[in-house]
Image (cartoon, rainbow, N blue to C red):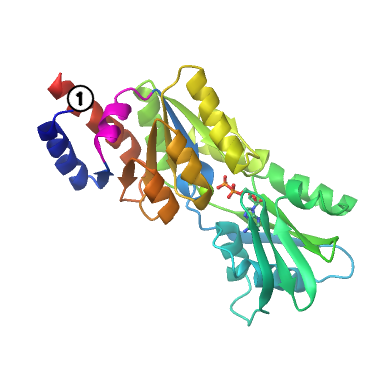
Amino acid sequence: ATPIAVMVATGRGAQLGIFLKGYQALDSSRLVDTVVFDKTGTVTQGVLRVGAVHTVEGFTDDEVLYLAAAVENASEHSVGAAIVAATDGRDLEPVDDFRVEPGRGVSGVVDGRTVSVGSPRWTSRAAVVPATVARRCKELEAEGKTVVFVIVDDAIAGLIAVADLVKQSAAPSIAALQAAGLRTVLLTGDNEGAARTVAAEVGIDEVHFEMLPDQKVERLRRLQADGRSVAMVGDGINDGPALATADLGLAIGRGTDVAISAADIILVRDDLRSVPAALSLATATQRTIR
Ligand code: ADP
Ligand code: MG
């Protein structure tokens, strides 16, 4: 792209809330044939709410919720925010030894007890899952909910189900990309039920679930090895490596700093219709130059 064409595209982009970080943005977007979306906070609003709590004998719903919230209070994950919000501001115990396992969950010590909150896959490695918990988990996941297990001192104390809403701009954005001949893919660390529910709601072509951050990167590399030119749209802390690996990285503006610094294009508006708009802006710019 010539400097003039880049200037023009930059100006038009700014009006549309599309911030191009450099030449790379224009040169790669022309070729993109596949758009990969992160789920939570990108296709969905990322404002989760606690829908159900289920506990084993010896624990009340409130105990499990407040122990989980005490740990999640130190987390910046949207699942954690939902759990803290569900406690209605009652004072939470302080947490010691707080740890984050990206794509898996969090742990810490609350009032002398070791508490972990995380994906069923991750937490069930450390504790036996009671049959009632396993059954309730399957039911809730089939409904499209995200389920996390709460472990207290090496035993499962219960589960918490959270749910999110898709952005209104998601379906029209996917439809516009498909109309332009692009393939759409959903990548998520969440469970199969939640992933498929969201994909069906917005019309995404291909779904990959229970992906750890490095598996997301691996999946992008595999698409590229298949000859695809891939754009990745994300917002989260975990999305930095994927945004950097993609041929073109697009970060949602109110996303994390990590996502914003790894991306080629920043979408200032929290509106997914900016994705097809950004790609066609770049294509139009290339056409005027050639
Ligand atoms: P996504 O790909 O949807 O953005 P992540 O990769 O961030 O999801 O997380 C994947 C899964 O790991 C979540 O669905 C949840 O089960 C678990 N998880 C991650 N962070 C947390 C947390 N702070 N508290 C509880 N569970 C978590
Ligand atoms: Mg995310």
Instruction: Evaluate whether residue 61 shows in this view.
Output: yes
Position of residue 92 relative to residue 33, above or below, is below
Quadrant holding the N terminus: top left
Splitting the image into 4 quarters, where does residue 24 fall? top left
Position of residue 23 relative to residue 180, above or below, is below
Estimate the x, y position of residue 273 in percent, counting from the top left. 33, 40
Q: How many residues crowd around disc 1 within 10 Å: few (fewer than 14), some, or many (20 or more)?
A: some
Residue 62 inside the magenta-drawn segment: no
Is 287 on the left-hand or right-hand side of 156? left
Give whichever of 69, 236 is nearer the camera: 236
- Residue at image coords 24%, 26%: 283
Is 138 on the left-hand or right-hand side of 182? right
Quadrant holding the C terminus: top left
Is 164 on the left-hand or right-hand side of 263? right
Is 51 on the left-hand or right-hand side of 283? right
The yes-or-no answer for disc 1 within 8 Å of ligand 2 is: no
Residue numbers of the magenta segment: 22-32
- Residue at disc 1, secondary structure: helix
Estimate the x, y position of residue 3 in percent, counting from the top left. 13, 34
- Residue at image coords 77%, 53%: 123
Give amino acid for label 1: Gln
- Residue at image coords 60%, 58%: 79
Instruction: Evaluate whether residue 200 shows in this view.
Output: no
Residue extending farthest left: 4
Tell me the chief SS of the magenta region.
helix
Estimate the x, y position of residue 150 in percent, counting from the top left. 76, 61
Estimate the x, y position of residue 191 in percent, counting from the top left. 67, 42
Please give the residue where the numbered disc 1 appears in the rendered image: 286
Give whichever of 105, 177 is nearer the camera: 105
- Residue at image coords 49%, 48%: 44
